[in-house]
Amino acid sequence: MFYILGLLIAVGSLVASIIHLGQSASSYYDMVGFTMVIGGTLATAAITLPWDLAREIFYRLRELFYRPLPDRKDLLLTCMRVNEDVLKGVYKFDSPNKDLSHRILKDGVELIQLGFSADKIQTILKERLFQATERTRLIGTSIRSLSKYPPAFGLAGTVLGLVHLMRGVSDGMTPQETGIRMAIALIATFYGLLVANLIVNPAGEAISKHAHEEEKMGEIALQAVLLAADRMNMLETQEMLNSFVDERYRVDVLGLSTINEPSAEESIATPGAA
């Protein structure tokens, strides 16, 4: 979601700059530069990306455009429901949510039902969590590493344009046309910088950021599973899980918390307090 917002801001800034310069968008069109930058970047991607994770690569790229970061408070509420179900002897967790944290909860409940000890469950789920986040990090790093190639291909496009320019000069090209061809040649470098710093590198950074957030959420889910495996009561589970998040994400399903509620003394001391 924020990736789209960033792109819209960048495009708006670019359009505003072109309008301020009093030029038309057609002045920044160059088929040679476009072909060199896009074709070269795609060729490099075909060579360097880990295509054994092709399905996950496309999934991670697709989610940049529609999927917000997971909500920690919603996860804590889900974890509390899972703990309550386990205490009641209900070993079933079905969720349409395919986030890593929900997969950890689902696997954890199954392991509890199979009679695995808390230590064994921790070992199994920690490894699954590590492998899943490591794959996402690999994808983010691989995409981010692509950002060094578009400027190089843009420079190659500029060189082609300059070669074309020099041939024109040798054929007696007018000064006006020389300037136009020089401008067109430089557009390829412009394309390379845009693709690298506006599309490719931010995409890799966003995927890596999502991997970090998924890891944090997965760790919360793992702790919830371990608490459920130990048959921890609801109050202790709530307070333990709340310790993993900032105050604004904490839950109070038992109605015992006084977080963000001012005391009587604070209300009296605060100007304008009712």
Image (cartoon, grey):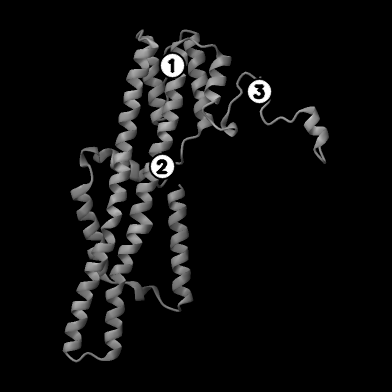
Q: Contact (CB < 8 A) between labels 1 and 3?
A: no
**Place of residue 87 in the rendered image (x, y in percent of width and height, measured from the top left):** 50, 9
Kind of residue indicated by mark 2: Lys
**Place of residue 170 in the rendered image (x, y in percent of width and height, measured from the top left):** 16, 88
Q: CA distance from mark 3 to mark 2?
A: 31 Å
Instruction: Choose the circle earlier in sequence order: 1 or 3.
Output: 1
- Residue at x-position 47% and y-position 65%: 13
Is 255 situated left or right of 116 in this image? right
Location of mark 1 (residue): 226
- Residue at x-position 22% and y-position 60%: 39
Location of mark 3 (residue): 257
Kind of residue indicated by mark 1: Leu
Kind of residue indicated by mark 3: Ser
| Residue 96 visible in the snapshot | no
Q: CA distance from mark 2 to mark 1?
A: 26 Å
Q: CA distance from mark 1 to mark 3?
A: 23 Å
Tag shown at residue 271: none
Q: Contact (CB < 8 A) between labels 3 and 2?
A: no
Label 1 residue SS: helix
Instruction: Choose the circle earlier in sequence order: 2 or 1.
Output: 2
Is 186 situated left or right of 165 in this image? right
- Residue at x-position 34% and y-position 9%: 114
Label 2 residue SS: helix
Location of mark 2 (residue): 209
Instruction: Choose the circle earlier in sequence order: 3 or 2.
Output: 2
87 is higher (above) or lower (below) than 253? above
Q: Residues within 10 Å of mark 2 (few under 14, many from 20)?
A: some
**Place of residue 128 in the rendered image (x, y in percent of width and height, measured from the top left):** 32, 25
- Observer-nearest of 34 and 228: 228
